[in-house]
Image (spheres, rainbow, N blue to C red):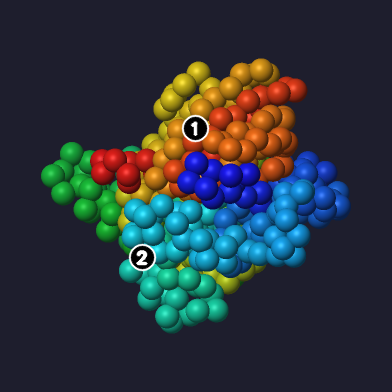
């Protein structure tokens, strides 16, 4: 595969993470893509959580040489994408090199979520440097991790804090939370005048206090409170329909019995994305993915500060002190139609954007040459990729690295072709 600038497009062998929250091999999109991409045999009952495309050391991709390449190249079959980029930095384009050095600034993934991920946040650059220095075994790099999730199926998540009005309702309706945070803290929230000039600051201070107390409650008190909550909700479900949030909390309790994350779910917005909708998450914002399949893109980092719904290490103090405590429903992106076939999702971060491309059989689309690199994932179907001096078949499960300054024409051949592309945010090049 050769690009306009003489560099080749590179097929990649992706990496899979089998975290325990993943969907089973029999139903996970991640497992299907892994089998197609690497030929690996899938274990139907094993969890398949994340399909990684990029250079991060926790899931490095390897170049797959084309059939018919020269022998000399064939011998280098296990060259990592990261090493290859370091040796050929011009594939990134000079603006990207200047800003981020000789590495890919984004990490591209597909997620198959079978049960809730931990309640977590990702540090900003300053905190990431500090955490990496203090606890390098837990925080493995010094980068921030803004991210965006684009739903493939219906995708559910908890994201950001609810409004002050909703928080007051929670404290009125969920006595088990008041028991854990204490009546004084609850009163502090209830007495905030929503019409006051300094309401936002007061609300943040009160929310921080109440949330920190909840997350810091002893294991014994938490277990007792959740047990009471469960009994109360099961009893009330015989008299009335439970709210969506109450039903969710009961589901979470089954997945993570006695976990403080079950109660803290009441504090967060419950978001349901339809296929084709996206959600972006800035640094220091709390969230937890709950179920479904999505395409995810982020800055190249794996830093996660966890505090609930997890058997992993919890860093409650760090999480509670780092959060912004912004309140209100998150922005949902529906994407920008670039053409009848391509929708672009532009988060407010320089490192990445994502395109979703659905090509009907027989149709073609041009991805113009841009000054940065891209990674393409063929998600469903089969087609042809063509650059200035190369043409090749692309089938579902294929992952392809495209160097900067390469014009690419893609045609759907035998059936509809669904592709996803990750690249540097185009606003970065246009200086917007």
> Looking at this view, is 13 or 224 the one in front?
13
- State the residue in front, 370 or 332: 370
Location of residue 94 by image quarter: bottom left
Secondary structure beneath dot 1 equals strand
Q: Which residue is mark 1?
A: 367
Residue ID for mark 2: 125
Residue 160 in percent (x, y) is at: 42, 48
Residue at the image point whose x is 63% and y is 25% from the top: 411
Q: Kindly identify the residue that appears in the image at 49 percent across and 36 percent down.
A: 407
**Judging from the image, what secondary structure is the residue with disc 2 in?**
helix
> Residue 25 placed where, x, y %?
80, 48
Residue 241, percent across and down?
60, 30
**Residue at 29% over, 40% down:** 430
Of all residues shown, which one is farthest toward the bottom?
134
- Characterize the local packing of mark 2: few (<14), some (14-19) or many (20 or more) Cα atoms within 10 angstroms: some
The answer to whether residue 303 is above or below residue 324 is below
* Residue at x-position 32% and y-position 46%: 428
Q: Is residue 306 above or below residue 163?
A: below
Q: Is residue 311 above or below residue 160?
A: below
Q: Considering only vertical position in the picture, is 182 above or below 313?
A: above
Is tag 2's residue or tag 1's residue first in the polypeptide sequence? 2
Q: Quadrant of residue 390?
A: top right
Confirm or deny contact between disc 2 and disc 1 (CB under 8 A): no
Q: Is residue 274 visible?
A: no
Crowdedness near tag 1: few (<14), some (14–19) or many (≥20) residues, C-alpha within 10 Å: few
> Disc 2 versus disc 1: distance between alpha carbons?
32 Å
């Amino acid at each position: 595969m050769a690009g306009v600038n003489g560099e080749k497009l590179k097929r990649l062998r992706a990496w899979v993470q089998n975290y325990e929250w993943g969907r089973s091999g029999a139903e996970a999109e991640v497992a299907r893509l892994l089998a197609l991409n690497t030929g690996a045999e899938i274990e139907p009952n094993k969890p398949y959580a994340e399909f990684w495309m990029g250079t991060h050391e926790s899931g490095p991709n390897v170049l797959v040489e084309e059939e018919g390449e020269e022998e000399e190249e064939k011998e280098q079959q296990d060259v990592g994408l990261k090493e290859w980029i370091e040796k050929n930095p011009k594939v990134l384009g000079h603006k990207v090199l200047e800003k981020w050095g000789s590495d890919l600034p984004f990490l591209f993934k597909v997620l198959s979520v079978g049960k809730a991920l931990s309640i977590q946040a990702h540090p900003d650059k300053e905190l990431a440097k500090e955490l990496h220095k203090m606890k390098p075994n837990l925080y493995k790099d010094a980068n921030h991790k803004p991210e965006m999730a684009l739903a493939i199926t219906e995708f559910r998540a908890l994201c950001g804090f609810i409004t002050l009005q909703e928080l007051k309702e929670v404290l009125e309706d969920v006595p088990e939370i008041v028991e854990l945070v204490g009546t004084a803290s609850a009163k502090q929230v209830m007495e905030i005048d929503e019409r006051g000039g300094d309401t936002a600051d007061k609300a943040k201070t009160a929310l921080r206090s109440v949330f920190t107390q909840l997350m810091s409650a002893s294991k014994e008190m938490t277990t007792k409170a959740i047990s009471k909550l469960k009994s109360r909700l099961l009893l009330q479900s015989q008299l009335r329909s439970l709210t969506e949030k109450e039903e969710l909390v009961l589901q979470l309790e089954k997945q993570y019995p006695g976990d403080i994350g079950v109660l803290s779910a009441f504090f967060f917005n419950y978001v349901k994305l339809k296929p084709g909708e996206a959600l972006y998450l800035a640094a220091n914002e709390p969230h937890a993915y709950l179920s479904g399949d999505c395409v995810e893109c982020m800055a190249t980092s794996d830093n996660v500060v966890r505090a609930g719904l997890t058997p992993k290490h919890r860093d409650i103090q760090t999480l509670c002190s780092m959060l912004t405590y912004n309140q209100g429903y998150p922005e949902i992106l529906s994407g920008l139609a670039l053409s009848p076939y391509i929708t672009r999702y532009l988060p407010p971060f320089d490192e990445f954007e994502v395109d979703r491309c659905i090509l009907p059989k027989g149709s073609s689309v041009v991805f113009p040459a841009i000054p940065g690199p891209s990674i393409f994932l063929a998600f469903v179907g089969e087609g042809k990729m063509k650059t200035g001096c190369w043409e090749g078949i692309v089938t579902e499960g294929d992952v392809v690295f495209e160097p900067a300054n390469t014009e690419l024409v893609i045609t759907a051949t035998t059936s509809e072709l669904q592709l996803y592309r990750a690249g540097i945010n185009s606003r970065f090049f246009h200086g917007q």
